[in-house]
Amino acid sequence: MRRLMWLSLLVLVWALLPVGGATAASFTVTPQTIEVGTGFNGARIKVSGKVPEGSDVYIKVVSPDRPAGLSKQGRKGGLWMAVETVTVRGMPGMYQVLASGAVRDLPPELRAQTGIDPDYAAIRANARVTEKHEDKTVELPPERAGEFTAGLVRLYERRGLYAVRDNAVRVQGETFEAEIPIPADIPKGETQITVYAVKDGSLVGNNAQTLHVESVGLVRVMASMAQTNPVAYGLLAVGVALAAGLSISWAFRQLNRLIFKEEGVGAHH
Amino acid sequence: MPVAGMPVNGLLIAGLGGLVGIMSGLFGVGGGFLLTPLLIMVGIPPAVAAASDSNQIVAASCSGAAAHKRLGNVDMKLGLIYLVGGILGGTVGAQTVKVLRGVGNYDFAVKLIYVVVLTLIGGFMFVESLNALRGRRKDNPEARPSRFRQYLARLPFQTEFRVSGIRASVLFVVGLGFLVGWLAAMMGVGGGFITLPAMIYLLGVPTIVAVGTDLFQIVFTSMNVTFQQAITNHTVDVVLAVILFAGSTIGAQIGARLSKRLRGEQLRILLSIIVLAVMVNMLIGLLTTPADLITFTRGGGGH
């Protein structure tokens, strides 16, 4: 019992020590859950915590993989249309890196260790790009896959899903804080937020937290139903439309009768 | 939006619905052929725009259809035979959408079809209303398609449609229904711009019966298209549809009131210019080099 107490005290002291092993970074994420509802229009996640004094802080935000269907546009008969279609798998749906300085200042050996990838090179190399030939699925060789993974990165960057943000973490003594802009089409699931403290070219602390992204309310019910139970969803969509059409036209008739003392005009046609 | 899978400003969507509603109230057209392109222009994936528009049309047309039915303006026999084609066409149309989306060319196809259709509608309306403004009589509609009507009269399976007071081939009616049903799925429209001229000028159906029968078939064709799109393409966004409908209902009330105060011919020129402007926008989309050669196949997110 006594030994256990000593042990736990030791652990406590060790944990509170400002400069320790590679875990000496602690932080909180607010909010910890993002609820994507009907009016969801993106969010800002606050990350703040402590790192050993004098460290550079890097924050890596990675969402689960999500497959993406891509087309390459080409000109046929003067009109632009899709000439090639592929599926890209194995790339995270969101990938952001924030740093107190410049992300590119991170030494190469630490890039590999932390998975911080300012050129998205490792992420792209990891992706599998496949093409359908009749009923066979063929994986594209790297020299042809590169065009599509680079294109996907551009598409994601444009939506704010992929970003490398220099000078986006404020460090003051031991404390740091940062705001991560989350675009509205953030992938659902568990997003990992990892903080790395780097001092004198080596990793002096790191810690990870999970940000939960879930659909709520009407959006969740509808979105999941549309995918998992399309027959019921289709019937519901038709039913809702009929109910809306008939009830609103009835309501307008009443309203017109009341206000204008006349028969209402039909809603359409 | 749950299915569009993207953030969409609800007010903007309601506003677009309202705009199209005002036009449909002003001009007495359905407006589906304007709503889908407008939705595409604000960034809704074309397949979601078309399917949700079909859903919206169910709401927008059902009360009108019921009213016409009560007034006896629906030729049930014509409507039901037309619907045989319409249901088949809509079902095949949803499958066509699926195939085209698989190869990443639905966006291309829908824009191309819109350019053709909007050019025809807009051009016809423009010339028509310009002639009317200049005080010229338009050609007798009976005169031009007379050879076509003679050909129609020779088709097999001629039958009597008593409410409309016409004889027509079942084959032609089913074929026409099929075309309109297919376009309804591809474009997210009711297809009145084809059904009405075809019924009035080619079949000789009285205008009021044509309007009633068209609305009747639109309700069921759009219900089928909505359902087919939901089960084959998962592209129906019911939230989007309801917001559109709310906007267009209010717009239609405003439009109908406005139309009592404004002159018809100028209005029709205005509508034709709007239609042609939307067409040009679609055409530019087809002709200009895309900003990025790599795009999402399904037009929307990577889901």
Image: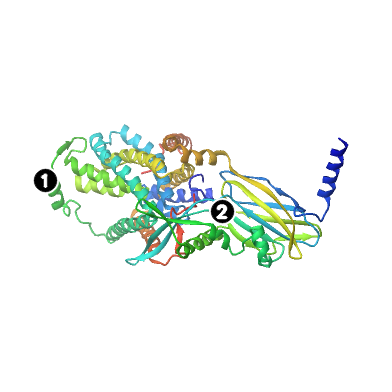
Q: The disc labelled 2 sits on which kind of residue? A: Pro
Q: Nearer the viewer, residue A82 or A206?
A: A206
Same chain for the residues under marks 1 and 2 in the image: no
User: x and y percent of residue A65 in the render?
Assistant: 55, 51
Mark 1 chain: B
- Whether residue A202 is visible to the viewer of this picture, yes or no, is yes
Q: The disc labelled 1 sits on which kind of residue? A: Arg
**How far is disc 1 from disc 2 in space, using C-alphas?**
63 Å
The quadrant in which residue B116 appears is bottom left
- Up the image or down, A36 lies above or below B108; here it is above
Residue tagged 2: A92
User: x and y percent of residue B295 in the render?
Assistant: 46, 59
Left or right: residue A9 versus residue A155 is: right
Residue tagged 1: B154
Residue B126 — which label?
Answer: none
Residue at (50, 42) in percent of width and height: A223
Q: Nearer the viewer, residue A107 or A256?
A: A107
Mark 2 chain: A
The quadrant in which residue B136 appears is bottom left
User: x and y percent of residue B133 in the render?
Assistant: 30, 59
- Up the image or down, B231 lies above or below A26; here it is above
Question: SS class of the residue under badge 2?
Answer: loop
